[in-house]
């Protein structure tokens, strides 16, 4: 029982880290209709920014805020000059454009920061562990779980219960009609994109203990983030959360019980889920 509970805590923490990083990609794919394979690159940029700020002597909280703001500032010109050209374009065009951006970011990061791993030092409050009775759990893992819950709740409220969410959904459904009603669609897209990359940066920082920061981070985890969104259903917050928790649990259990198989069980589960639910778990949830 102690082993089961330990696996459950680790799986929940890993699943929440995947969710925090991937939910921005779910927004761009499901609501903005853009297959942004450079999403992992923005998460990496956020992690590198936070590492630089933290090692410069600033606190962990300041490092997170700086990473999110800096990544959004970097991303906005890209949205204006590059991404705006591929809104509504074919999937192949979007894939080629965004994967090209990914390789450019990898090259720049490798040149500027070098090929070594980067760390984001945890504050004293997140070091050590908490005794839950059945085992001691790292404070960092509890923090990651809490971050995932806050992001899920906050993003759901923003999209479903605010005026901005109404404008975003209207723009997605019919951009021309929304514009004729006074919605500034370009600003809505830019703000949504900035939010998505800021969440990616936040996830890159929070998840740096589980997904190490290095120049090829964007390629190493690109398929993982894309798979999570596809399994959950693009644009669905509950679907993305369920997919992250389910796949995180399967991956964690596989690594505990059969580490020699690597990510075999993770991708086997993906194949099975996609076969049973081609529209993703979100499509299944809507039917019910």
Image (cartoon, rainbow, N blue to C red):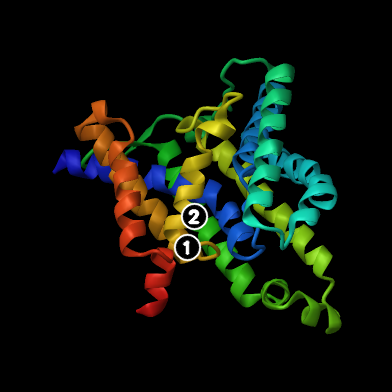
Which residue lies at the image location 64% right of the left edge and 62% below the top edge?
33
Which residue lies at the image location 33% right of the left edge and 53% below the top edge?
246
Q: Position of residue 125 (x, y in %)?
A: 50, 35
SS at mark 2? helix
Position above or below: 138 against 142 = above
Q: Which mark identifies residue 233? A: 1
SS at mark 1? loop
Left or right: 237, with 254 as reference point: right
**Residue 9 visible in the shown view:** no
Q: Quadrant of the N terminus?
A: top left
Q: Would you identify the image quadrant in which residue 3 lies?
A: top left
Left or right: 77, with 50 as reference point: right
How many neighbours does mark 2 have within 10 angstroms: few (below 14), some (14-19), or many (20 or more)?
Answer: many
The one nearer the camera, 72 or 172, is 172
Is there CB contact under 8 Å for labels 1 and 2? yes
Q: Position of residue 268 (x, y in %)?
A: 29, 45
- Can you identify the residue that label 2 sits on? 229
The one nearer the camera, 172 or 255, is 172
Q: Quadrant of the C terminus?
A: bottom left
The one nearer the camera, 173 or 156, is 173
Position above or below: 206 against 121 = below
Which residue lies at the image location 69% right of the left edge and 50% below the top edge?
93
Which residue lies at the image location 39% right of the left edge and 59% below the top edge?
242
Q: Would you identify the image quadrant in which residue 284 lies?
A: bottom left
Position above or below: 274 against 3 = below
Q: Position of residue 138 (x, y in %)?
A: 38, 35
- Label tally: 2
For the residues labelled 1 and 2, the Cα–Cα distance comes to 6 Å
**Residue 226 visible in the shown view:** yes
């Amino acid at each position: 029982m102690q082993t089961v509970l330990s696996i459950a805590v680790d799986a929940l923490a890993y699943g929440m880290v995947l969710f925090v990083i991937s939910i921005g990609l779910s927004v761009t794919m499901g609501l903005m209709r853009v297959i942004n394979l450079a999403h992992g690159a923005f998460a990496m940029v956020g992690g590198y920014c936070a590492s630089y700020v933290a090692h410069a002597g600033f606190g962990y909280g300041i490092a997170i805020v700086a990473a999110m703001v800096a990544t959004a500032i970097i991303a906005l010109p890209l949205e204006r000059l590059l991404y705006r050209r591929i809104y509504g374009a074919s999937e192949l065009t979007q894939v080629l454009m965004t994967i090209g951006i990914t390789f450019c970011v990898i090259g720049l990061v490798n040149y500027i920061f070098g090929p070594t791993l980067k760390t984001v030092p945890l504050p004293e409050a997140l070091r050590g562990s908490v005794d839950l009775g059945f085992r001691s759990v790292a404070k960092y893992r509890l923090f990651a779980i809490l971050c995932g819950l806050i992001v899920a709740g906050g993003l759901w409220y923003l999209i479903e219960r605010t005026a901005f969410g109404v404008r975003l959904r209207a723009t997605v459904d019919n951009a021309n009609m929304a514009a004729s009603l006074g919605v500034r669609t370009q600003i809505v897209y830019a703000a949504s994109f900035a939010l998505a990359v800021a969440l990616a940066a936040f996830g890159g920082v929070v998840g740096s203990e589980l997904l190490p920061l290095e120049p090829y981070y964007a390629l190493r985890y690109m398929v993982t983030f894309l798979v999570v969104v596809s399994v959950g259903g693009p644009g669905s917050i509950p679907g993305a959360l369920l997919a992250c928790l389910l796949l995180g649990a399967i991956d964690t259990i596989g690594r505990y019980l059969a580490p020699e198989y690597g990510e075999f069980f993770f991708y086997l589960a993906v194949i099975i889920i996609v076969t049973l639910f081609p529209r993703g778990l979100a499509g299944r949830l809507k039917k019910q």
